[in-house]
Image (tube, rainbow, N blue to C red):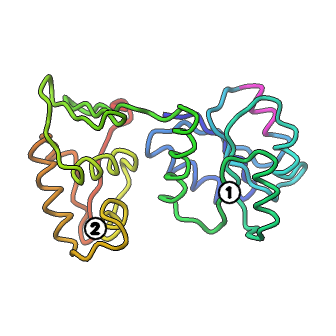
Amino acid sequence: MAKILIAEDEHAINTLIKKNLTLVGHSCVCVFDGEAVFDALEAHSFDLILLDIMMPKMDGFQVLEALIERIPVIFLTARSAIDDRVKGLRLGADDYIVKPFDMLELQARIETVLRRFNKADTTFTLADVKIDMAGQQVFKGESFVELSPKEFLLIETFVKNRNIALSRDKLLEMVWGYDFYGDTRTVDVHVHSLRKKLGWEHMIKTVYKTGYRLEVAKHED
């Protein structure tokens, strides 16, 4: 997974982002002002920077202008004006997300940017199951597992959001799309099929009155 620098001066938001990104396997370093970004860059190598605009000492625009090495940057900001978005993108930001935001949306944006820079994981292994994201293939031991396109999208969604409870409605939206007219029983049927095919009866947990969660211990990432 990726090494991510979170530059956000609001401690509660910074901590929440770190907690959620750590859950899905990323490694995070937190700083709370613009100057501290450069201290962190001297001490660590990062795959991505989440950069708030309104920070003390140096704002996000100033930080981005001063960056020497090319590191993917996603702006996090309460400033939703088009002029601010245009300025950020023209300075070289790779994406721009306005507060308040959904953590699943942030994770999806991060995944997209990492993939653009060839920094996203292309394989995932849990127990005896190996998932090839790029090739859209799944193997259990040495055996190829035949999955339908929706089953693969579902397991890919679980993997990218591992250790996070996903509601049935959210899974319908993420896998089947906004215009799907079926009901949440579709999710249950596909989850049952995945559990059986992959032997993940104890990995894909049912979250009472909510949905499901792929439970992954850190050492298995």
> Where residue 130 sits: x, y (%)?
25, 30
| Tags 2 and 1 touching, CB below 8 Å | no
Residue placed under numbered mark 1 in the picture: 96
The residue positioned farthest toward the top in the image shown: 142
Q: Is residue 120 above or below residue 62?
A: above
- Give the quarter of the image for residue 28: top right
Residue at horizontal 14 percent and vertical 48 percent from the top: 195
SS class, disc 2: helix
Residue placed under numbered mark 2 in the picture: 168
- Disc 1 marks a residue whose amino acid type is Tyr
Q: How many marks?
A: 2
Q: Main secondary structure of the magenta part?
A: helix
Front residue (pair 141, 173) = 173
- Disc 2 marks a residue whose amino acid type is Arg
Q: Is residue 127 above or below residue 172?
A: above
Query: Magenta stretch containing residue 38, yes or no?
Result: yes
Tag of residue 189: none
Which stretch appears magenta? 37-43
Front residue (pair 201, 179) = 179
> Where residue 156 sits: x, y (%)?
32, 46
Distance of label 2 from label 1 (alpha carbons):
28 Å
Task: Describe residue 4's horizontal placement relative to residue 129 as left or right.
Answer: right
Residue at horizontal 52 percent and vertical 46 percent from the top: 112
> Where residue 199 sits: x, y (%)?
12, 40
> Where residue 72 sits: x, y (%)?
67, 39
SS class, disc 1: strand
